[in-house]
Image (cartoon, helix red, strand yellow):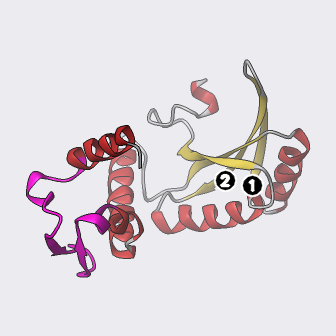
Amino acid sequence: MEWNTFRALARLISKLLPRDEWDLDHTRKCESCGIEIDFTTSLAHHQRCKACDDAREAEYWTKTLRELKAAGVDLTREAEIDFVYCFFCASDAEEMAGKVKSLGFEALLQRSQHNLWEEWSVRCRTSMVPSRDSIEAALDTLCEFAYGYENWYHGWGVVGCRNDVDAPENE
């Protein structure tokens, strides 16, 4: 490993780990799953630990639903929710929109021109009670459809919610 690469890695690790964990012989247990880890595997373990991942997911959903409620979204009633996917190929976007419509979603197709490329976004809109279970179920279904295309998932939001900067009403 080149010296500059090693120094950059050491700087990164020193920012991510408290000083008391810098001891290369120091081992400890993962707070989430209890597995014994050492300094060299600590960072990698936290990126793939199922228990850590579950804790991050739970924290994300708790925070997100709290923010939606604070923004005025009634979490007990149906709301219009958009799931946005971006494509480099117009025919892929149109095909995805067709599949989404067959599920009962509304599909809004939008073309964006950038300096070096153009992209198409498909907003998959549906009404549902905004909960972790309903949103994850919709995401699983939509991602399964999108899997076969060269695309990326852009995100989801409640239409008209002031926290949803991507909603068509806010553009």
Residue nearest the observer in this picture, 162 or 110: 110
Which quadrant does the C terminus fall into? top right
Give coordinates of residue 120: x percent, y percent: 78, 36
Tell me the residue that label 1 is attached to: 105
Mark nearer the N terminus (2 vs 1): 1
Q: Element at badge 1?
A: loop
Q: Which region shows up in magenta?
A: 16-43
Check disc 1: other Cα within 10 Å, few if <14, some if 14-19, many if 20+: some
Residue 24, disc: none
Q: Is residue 127 left or right of residue 117?
A: left
Give coordinates of residue 131: x percent, y percent: 47, 62
Give coordinates of residue 111: x percent, y percent: 79, 29
Give coordinates of residue 1: x percent, y percent: 41, 50
Q: Element at badge 2?
A: strand
Residue 41 on the magenta span: yes
Task: Name the residue located 28 percent from the left edge and 65 percent from the top edge.
Answer: 40
Task: Name the residue located 73 percent from the left edge and 21 percent from the top edge.
Answer: 114
Tell me the residue that label 2 is attached to: 126
Amino acid type, mark 2 = Thr
